[in-house]
Image: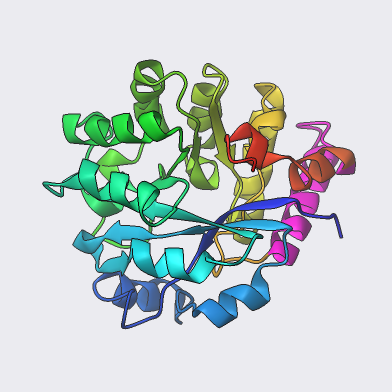
Amino acid sequence: MSTVAVDVHTHLGEHGTHVCDPLAGDEIRAWGSVSWDVTVERHRAAATARTSIVLAFDAEPVGVVVPNDYVAQAVSEHDDLIGFASVNPNRTNAPDLLDAAVTKLGLRGLKLGPCYQHFHPHDPAAWDLLEVAEHHGIPVLWHQGTTFTPAAIVDYSRPQQLDAVARRFPNLRMWIAHFGHPWAEEAVSVVRRHEHLYVDASALDTRPWQLAQAMAAAYEYRVLDKVLFGTDFPFSTVERMVAGLQQAAALCRRLGIADIGSDDVDAICQRDSLTLLGLSP
């Protein structure tokens, strides 16, 4: 198996405590079981990349609140873990909350999910929050794609909406989760226009055809070098994602849609995402 340098997308959060209805119930209805039930101990056992980013998530509108201080405590004293804050821009004191998460809790990035947090990426409140991120030089992960819960507002999820954001904040390092699925071509078409905008491939091993199409689009748009490795743990694992990327590359070659080799997959797995995202020590 390829060595994985950085997993840019992992979660904490216990079912019934941090992950509640409506999303918790919708997860069971969509998939038949609970996946998002991750204790600190379970996360540590699964974090097999050399470095893993661990996400807070302030998504109260859909029943998910993984607090910033909880993540900060979980990653403390672990050099192989990097904690990201999450703040809903709709909160009246959102900029102050993010500032405190960085300066007092030591968190090093920001997780946003417009469809879960019920804000549009062009909302002035969101841009106020991004100004704080820019001030501190921290990167931003966007869930800019679809989801299974009806409680989300998917109108806010198109990757194309980040074009205006990237033009307003050209030096802010950002990436789109899950290839922006199911709009992967849209996501890579935006990513190729902006120097500091990337995508991750997290959890798409569960959709082999969609992952193959996304990889082919990245190949065609010449942005395979901007694809970051992520798992979306607990929804996938390092081992499953590596296998999924290799399977997608083989499918691309077999169908003749993209000449993506094992070396290209190795490059994704071994990518120095910390440097690209401005997170190097």
The percent coordinates of residue 248 (x first, y second) are 74, 48
Q: Residue at x 66, y 73 (%)?
A: 46
Q: In this orientation, which residue lies closer to the viewer: 36 or 31?
A: 36
Residue 116 point in image, percent of width and height: 28, 54
Q: Is residue 259 magenta?
A: yes
Is residue 21 left or right of 140 when viewed as pictured? left
Q: Residue 100: x and y, percent?
A: 30, 50
Camera-side residue: 39 or 62? Answer: 39
- At x 78% / y 53%, what residue is drawn? 247
Q: Does the segment drawn in magenta span residue 5?
A: no
Q: Residue, x 28% and y 76% (percent of image)?
A: 20
Callout count: 0
**Nearest the eye: 240 or 258:** 240
On the rendered image, what quadrant is the C terminus found in? top right
Q: In which quarter of the image is the N terminus?
A: bottom right
The stretch of residues the image draws in magenta is 238-262
